[in-house]
Image (tube, rainbow, N blue to C red):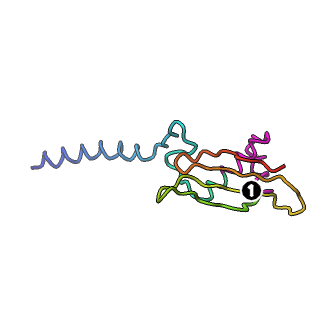
Amino acid sequence: MRTVLITIAIIGAIVVPFSLHGQARRQRRLPGYCIDANEEGDSEFVVAQAVRAFANSIGITDSVQVVEFQKEKQVLKFQLIKNGSVEQGTIVELEPTDPNILGGGALVWVDSETFCPIVLRRYQ
C-alpha cells in the first residue's frame, strides 16, 4: 500500500508541472486569423482592428502613430451583421473627433470569425 502511495505521489509530481506548463504557453495565431487564440474578440477589439486597418490604409503603420490616430477618430456607427443567428461580421463607421474636419472617415468591415478588417471605403 505504501509503495502505491509513493508511486502516485511521484507520478503526480511529474505530471502536474507539465500540465501547468501547457496552460502557461501562449497559443499561436491560426493561419488566416487576425487574433491570437487566447485573445478575446470583443467590441473594443473590433473597433481597434477597424482603426488600425484605416490607419494602415493611409500609410500609418507605426504602432505609436496608430494610437495617436485612434485618439483623433470616433465610432459613428457600429452594426453587427447576422445571417439568421450566425454572426458574420461588424461594420464600423469612423469619423474625425473634430466636427470642423470634413472627410477623414472610413467604413470598415471586421469579420466575426477571423477578426480581420477590410476597409470598404474612405471618406476624403
Which three-letter amino acid code belongs to the residue tagged 1?
A: Leu
Residue 115, horizontal then vertical, whole percent: 57, 48
- Magenta residue span: 49-73
Q: Residues within 10 Å of mark 1 (few under 14, many from 20)?
A: many
Residue nearer the viewer, 77 or 29: 77
Q: Main secondary structure of the magenta part?
A: helix
Task: Give the number of marks.
Answer: 1
Residue at 78% across, 57% down: 95
Residue 63, horizontal then vertical, whole percent: 73, 44
**Direction from residue 55 to residue 22 in the image, left or right:** left
Residue 97, horizontal then vertical, whole percent: 81, 61
Residue at 57% across, 52% down: 89
**Direction from residue 119 to residue 40 in the image, left or right:** left
Residue nearer the viewer, 19 or 64: 64
**Residue under pointer 1:** 94
Q: Is residue 97 above or below residue 22?
A: below
Does 67 lie within the magenta span? yes
